[in-house]
Amino acid sequence: QVHLVESGGGSVEAGGSLRLSCAASGYTYRRYCMGWFRQASGKEREGVAVMLSDLNTIYADSVKGRFTISQDNTKNTLYLQMNSLKPEDTAMYYCAADLVFPGGSWIRGRGFDYWGQGTQVTVSS
């Protein structure tokens, strides 16, 4: 059973930066596909960025050039560096993992079996 715990959320002004962390535990070392997702109030969950098992990365168009997904395998931790934050980035951010990349459905926040509890990001204008 994979256990994921996010941290690093907070409140920032537009143009600011935050780095989210996702600490993973409860599994033997294998290459999981891991990603970041978000859900704004009143909206459906959406994919933000994903790192595939071969370490390739995919980003939602809305965050390309501003967000960077990375991982530190020595710490079993996934990161999301968020720069040039906008008010529309305000949401609960979740980390998720799965052994198999679900394909195009990832952008709709689907296809991942393991989820963290989320961390809130609020960007003020």
Image (cartoon, rainbow, N blue to C red):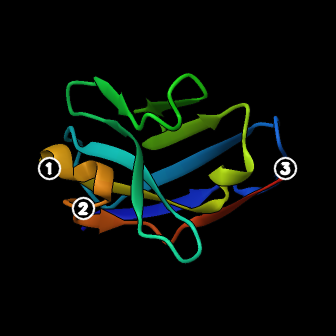
- The residue sitting at 44% across, 66% down in the picture is 116
Amino acid at dot 3: Val
Q: Taking 17 as reference, is 58 left or right? A: left
Say if 92 sits above or below 83 in the image: below
Amino acid at dot 1: Pro
Evaluate if marks 2 and 1 touch, with contact meaning CB atoms under 8 Å apart: yes
Give the position of the N terminus as an image quadrant.
bottom left
> Of the residues under marks 3 and 1, which one precedes in the sequence?
3
**Among all residues in the image, which is located at the extreme bottom?**
42
Sort mark 3 into few (<14), some (14-19) or many (20+) by Cα contacts within 10 Å: some
User: Which numbered dot is residue 69?
Assistant: none
- The residue sitting at 70% across, 31% down in the picture is 83
Give the residue pinned by disc 3: 12
- SS assignment at label 1: loop
- The residue sitting at 29% across, 25% down in the picture is 55
- The residue sitting at 72% across, 43% down in the picture is 86
User: Which numbered dot is residue 102?
Assistant: 1
Query: Which of the pair 47/6 is nearer the observer?
Result: 47
Give the residue pinned by disc 2: 110
Query: Which of the pair 119/45 is nearer the observer?
Result: 45
